[in-house]
Image (cartoon, rainbow, N blue to C red):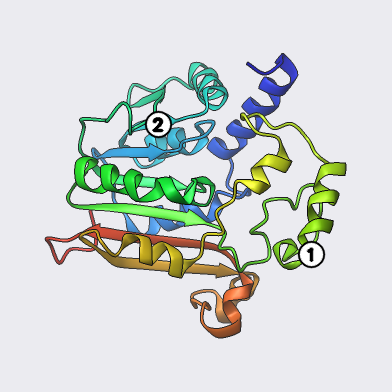
Amino acid sequence: MKNDKMIQKGINYAKKNFIGYDNHLALDKAFISRYFSLKGKDVLDFGCGMGGMSLWLAKNMECRVDGYDLDENHIFIAQELYREYPMENVHFSTRNIITEPIEKKYDLILLNDVIEHIKEAWIPQILQVLIHKNLKNDGFIIFTYPPWEGPYASHMHRIIPVPWLQYMPQSWVLKAIGKRNQPTVGRFDLYNEYLALNKMTHRKLTNLLKPFPLRQVQRNSHTKLNRIPLFSHLNLNRFFFRFLVTKELIAFQKVGTDSTKI
């Protein structure tokens, strides 16, 4: 377990994600609020991290949320945050769904800033379990992530504020990260976090999802241009615009209904 200073840093970060809107989860919260009605529904926050999003969903969307994560440090902080903001409709646990399958079925499964961190060889088996075993018929699965082509895909902006770092000579990039390396609240330091990224793109994700009975019902590709009122509702993700996408937010429905609302 991390030291007390690091734990408190994680709690403060998770608390901002829970109660704040001016943070990296603002787009996710707006996306879910706009397109989904979750009152009384069951939600799986897969790879819930430190729990801020799970608690936000439970409080603001009035749903039942199970938050699972492989990282025991993240779950420890999520449980600490839960003690400060107790809710009967939230549950956190460290769990590997491959070795310990979840028997419950969910109306919605959320992978918020998760899919790009999973080892690519593991993704098909994880999706197999989530979609076939845990997602209800007509249920929804949401992926949000910074695509590999975009300016912040490296996740290193906090220590190297240079966009499109992933396209620069990797020998220089790794050396620069190594010099500025920092521990994180989770199991990995920043250097190893960068090395573990699977270079996720929309094309790669949709190819991984092809074997499954899903249909895309909503895709928001956010760029800095969306802050301009004239472009606020445009999905600028074709041709060279895909290199400007800061975050992809995509929802799929398990086929069996024409409804696009829960």
Q: Residue at x 68, y 65 (%)?
A: 151
Q: Residue at x 69, y 32 (%)?
A: 184
213 left or right, relative to 146: left
| Residue 100 numbered tag | none
The x, y position of residue 41, in whole percent, is 24, 40
4 left or right, relative to 95: right
| Residue 169 numbered tag | 1
Inspect the image, locate mark 2, and give the three-letter code of the amino acid beneath it: Gly
Between discs 1 and 2, the one toward the N terminus: 2
Residues at marks 1 and 2, CA–CA distance in whole angstroms: 38 Å
> In the rendered view, would you say 116 is above or below 189?
below
10 left or right, relative to 36: right
Inspect the image, locate mark 1, and give the three-letter code of the amino acid beneath it: Pro
Q: Choose between 204 and 114: the one closer to the eye.
A: 204
The x, y position of residue 113, in whole percent, is 52, 48
The x, y position of residue 177, in whole percent, is 80, 47
Please name the residue that numbered disc 2 is placed on: 67
Look at the image and tell me in which quarter the N terminus lies. top right
193 left or right, relative to 252: right
Quarter of the view holding residue 222: bottom right
Q: Residue at x 72, y 67 (%)?
A: 167
The x, y position of residue 168, in whole percent, is 77, 66
Q: Residue at x 53, y 36 (%)?
A: 18
> In the rendered view, would you say 40 is above or below 86?
below
Element type at mark 2: strand
Element type at mark 1: loop
